Image: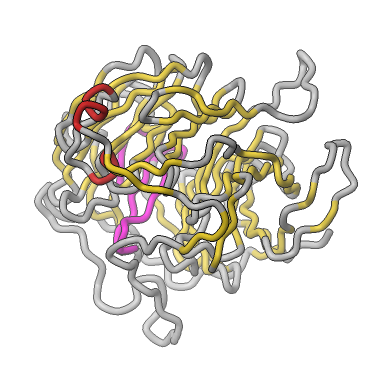
Amino acid sequence: MQFIELDGPLSGSPDIQRSGSPTTRLHTPTGNPFRPSNSTKTLAPAPPQYKRPRFSGQPLAFHLLPSAAASSSGLHPSSPYRRLTIMAGAQESLVLAGVMRGHNDVVTAIATPVDNSPFIVSSSRDKSLLVWDLTNPVQAISDTANATEYGVPFRRLTGHSHFVQDVVLSSDGQFALSGSWDGELRLWDLSTGVTTRRFVGHDKDVLSVAFSVDNRQIVSASRDRTIKLWNTLGECKYTIGGDLGGGEGHNGWVSCVRFSPNNFQPTIVSASWDRTVKVWNLTNCKLRCNLEGHGGYVNAVAVSPDGSLCASGGKDGVTLLWDLSEGKRLYSLDAGSIIHSLCFSPNRYWLCAATQDSIKIWDLESKHIVQDLKPEIPVSKNQMIYCTCLSWSADGSTLYAGYTDGTIRIYKISGFSYAG
């Protein structure tokens, strides 16, 4: 299999600038933030709300939780995400649909487009990112029974000098943002494979990156115990934590950071090895609430599609569910082993956790595990293969899982089909 390997020239990488006080508003100059003024390609702003795709096959019925049921679930009935659930068929389950091979080391993150376009981007400890074409699955010759090459890598993005720890996509699917142990963030034009921006400012490994809903702001988290807010020109506009960031920051590595999709309450959520989850007001970068309860370092944090719920997990093997609007703990879910990644289903009332033992999928109404996905190959005592990262397709039909053996396994919901 052949790849297109690119480490192209950098287009317009301005020096890093820090400015303002905690009340400094983060902004991007007018025009396309990702390109020089003479470029004709533009970034489409994110839509104000996610447009639910049309489904065919087994119908998915929405219903409102009665107040008693909401109370017994530990959920407040006011949030749309808490009130609405999808009742899938009793026989509905995730089945292995294929395996994708291309990375030479641990897969660290997977990014999927919000419009369900047939591609994904993955990052790895092999210091590269891969752009995968999902339009042409082929039967694979493999030791794995009935395995299919679900997609093929058609472009490898290189340039980072250390492990690539995280990757996310802009809402129009034209750009990828990566964070690496080399201390840098990079913005990639996926149509050319070229780095268009480098973000330099962290003193240690970058562990997590995220785009705001409107693509105009970027947040990063690092082993240097700071969270940085950037515009898309590569300028650091504010630093939370560290020597210059005030006393509200984390006291350990900041392992994960996410924007809330709730436009009415702009929020950043961060997780740390100091065992806490912190919720920040995006308008002034001030701490809104400090969420405590974990018994070990926190690896992962995820925000529900409507921005009302937050899930966190890590060393203690327990997932904690939080009410973001009220800043309080709702309940806990026991995963039984270290949690490496968390993600909410976009259209089912499910929370998925990548753990040291398996992928666990909880129904948040019943709090029961509805499925426990384990690698389909035998694992010896000297060989640990486990899931490190998870991402759902936008239509909720497919779960992509990255593993320590460098593969991406694809799980499809049986009986589900997507009508584009």
Q: Is 371 or 333 nearer to us in this picture?
A: 371
Q: From the top left corner, tell me how far across and down residue 111 is, in percent.
A: 52, 52
Residue 163, how many percent across, how many down?
59, 41
Q: Position of residue 317 (x, y in %)?
A: 46, 17
Query: Is 220 in the magenta?
Result: yes
Q: In the image, 405: left or right of 141?
A: left
* Left or right: 170 in relation to 133: left
Residue lying at 71% horizontally and 46% vertically, measured from the top left: 97
Looking at the image, which residue is at 44% across and 28% down? 299
Q: How is the image coloured?
A: secondary structure
Is residue 7 something one can see in this rendering? yes
Q: State the count of labels.
A: 0
Q: Residue at x 67, y 39 (%)?
A: 95
Q: Is residue 187 above or below residue 125?
A: below
From where the camera sits, is residue 290 visible? no
The residue drawn where x is 50% and y is 24% is 369
Q: Is residue 367 above or below residue 7?
A: above
Q: Percent from the top left, x then y, of residue 196?
A: 48, 68
Placement of 212 over or under 36, stated as above or below? above
Residue 387 lies in what quarter of the image? top right
Q: Between 356 and 72, which is closer to the camera in this rendering? A: 72
Quadrant location, the C terminus: bottom right
Magenta segment: 203-228
Instruction: Determine whether, in the image, residue 99 is placed left or right of residue 373.
Output: right
Q: Nearer the viewer, residue 164 or 363?
A: 363
Q: Pick the quarter of the image with the N terminus.
A: bottom right
Verify whether residue 222 appears in magenta.
Answer: yes
- Image quarter for residue 293? top left
